[in-house]
Amino acid sequence: MSKNRLEALSDGVFAIVITLLILDIRVPDVEYGQLAAALLAGLPRIFAYVISFGVIGVYWLAHHQSLQLVSKIDGWLIWINFIYLLAVSFMPFPTALLGRYPLQPLPIVIYALNLMLANGTGVVVLRYLRAHPELSSGYTYKAAHKTVFMYVFVNSSYLVAMLLGFYVPLASYAIFVVVLLVVIVYYSFSPVPQQATPSPAALHKP
């Protein structure tokens, strides 16, 4: 299978997920005198949408940069990618839960677990590429260590947010926002991987 087909499928999933996120936000069907109150009541859904939109954007960028390192794909990499897309495509559900029950612990826990699954799968992809150099090129140990460290930081933060959801829900949201901003800054200042070219070992494999 061509890597381009994997990229096209993944981009399609990301596009659909971003579209689905907005469907939980609707124009209030109330009298004009109640519009301000209705809009205020809808702020949690708008906040959840904005956060998830940013998260999906970061996931897309991370996925794109990971595939830039790939010169050849195999069956295992395809299925790991499907698990990653499963976690990404699930995002509209916990996002809707956060918007409807913003200060309850269970939606926060489900949201954090979803993010941790996606991040964990991202680590698996990078470790798999590290273990199979015939599938990638230009993936140095320094780059791998730096990326895995970022994943560990993010998932540790989400674990703290999940636990705080039972006691201080607003602190959980603060962690979600801070982590998102940190990751955006990280990817903004990180060099973009160049398109991988097939290694000599890959060229001689069937």
Image (tube, rainbow, N blue to C red):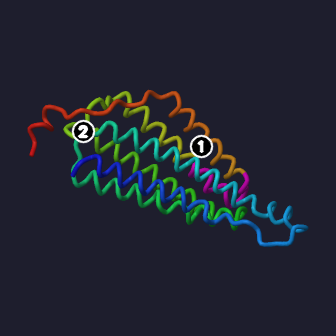
* Magenta highlight: main SS: helix
x, y percentage for residue 23?
61, 65
Q: Secondary structure at mark 1?
A: helix
**What is the residue that sits farthest to the right in this orientation?**
33
Callout 1–callout 2 Cβ contact below 8 Å? no
Q: Mark 1 — residue? A: 180
Name the residue at 23% across, 48% down.
2
Residues shaded magenta: 158-170
Q: In the shown orientation, is residue 9 left or right of residue 137?
A: right
Foreground mark, 1 or 2, reads 2
The percent coordinates of residue 143 (x first, y second) are 38, 30
Q: Is residue 162 magenta?
A: yes
Q: Nearer the viewer, residue 130 or 163?
A: 130
| Residue 127 sits inside the magenta stretch | no
Q: Is residue 166 left or right of residue 119?
A: right
State how far apart marks 1 and 2 are (Cα). Answer: 29 Å
Where's residue 13, x and y in %? 43, 57
Give the labeled residue for mark 2: 71
| Residue 196, above or below 104 | above
